[in-house]
Image (cartoon, grey):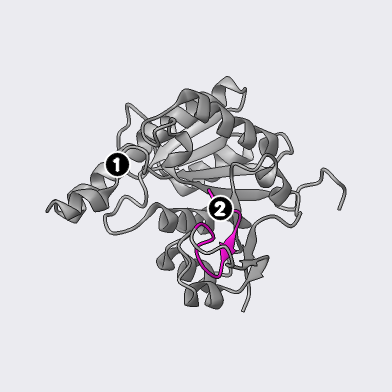
Amino acid sequence: MTENKPRYRRIMLKLSGEVLAGPHGCGIDPAQAAVIAAKIKAVYDLGVQVGLVIGAGNLWRGSIGVEYGMAQPTADHMGMLATVMNGLALQDALERADVPTRVQTAVTMNQVAEPYIRLRAMRHMEKGRVVVIAGGTGNPFFTTDTAAALRAMEVGAEVLIKGTQVDGIYTDDPKKNPHARKFDTISYSEAIEYRVRVMDLTALTLCMDHKLPVIVLNIWDDHSLLDAVLGKQVGTLVDGE
């Protein structure tokens, strides 16, 4: 494998909404969007086909609404709408970086974004467009992690990359336990057993059932995303038994 030859032809990237947040951890900061767009562009410039699922934690967390007595379907639908706002912000940042981008959403809103259609998403990627997939799965009770796993399998992605604020999966929370040990690789079963907090169990089980590799990395490391796509050891690889 040459230094700049990507290991993967098509990837699905999962990002939390917090990657777009400003200094207070909420809202949408165009400067942060530009930073993320530059990381995606570095991968795109290698000829890699990129799909991306975005969360909404910077704008709305359904769990907070539920704590105050809101019906979970209502809280979850609000979160789906918030992911579309994040998707549009990311599309704008990518287009400014000369990366053709389409936003698709599982929640129909034709004036704002395309509906998510599997074959159309694949065709966009084949034509060299990044596809930002918003709206979760379109159903309440499912996280955007699960949406990312589902969409990755639907479009034939070779790997699901989860960009977080930590550099992989640990035996314990590294922010609370300085003795927590990081895994370079871990099986699906072990990840489920450890009940890792970087990805929900439904998403992990889905990936295990369909043998979709998952890489968990710190999206804020300068070259982590690019290195992962190039096949270098970055973060934690979840794969196999």
Tell me if mark 2 has few (under 14), some (14-19) or many (20+) residues whose alpha carbon lies within 10 angstroms of its own: some
Q: Does residue 232 appear left or right of residue 58 in this picture?
A: right
Q: Amino acid at mark 1?
A: Trp
Residue at image mark 1: 60
Residue at image mark 2: 166
- Precedes in sequence: disc 2 or disc 1: 1
User: Quick one: 55 or 107, which is closer to the camera?
Assistant: 55
* The C terminus lies in quadrant: bottom right
The quadrant holding residue 215 is bottom right
Q: Is 174 part of what is drawn in magenta?
A: yes
Q: Does residue 228 appear left or right of residue 133 in this picture?
A: right
User: Quick one: 180 or 203, which is closer to the camera?
Assistant: 180
Q: Which residues are magenta?
A: 162-175
Q: Is 12 part of what is drawn in magenta?
A: no
- State the CA–CA distance, disc 2 to disc 1: 22 Å
User: Quick one: 211 or 33, which is closer to the camera?
Assistant: 33
Query: In the rendering, at what x and y percent does residue 18 appear?
Result: 43, 40
Residue that appears at 64% across and 63% down: 237
Query: In the rendering, at what x and y percent does residue 13 appear?
Result: 55, 48
Q: Amino acid at mark 2?
A: Val
Residue that appears at 53% across and 72% down: 191
Query: In the rendering, at what x and y percent does residue 154 appear?
Result: 50, 56
Looking at the image, residue 224 lies above or below residue 36: below
Element at badge 1? loop
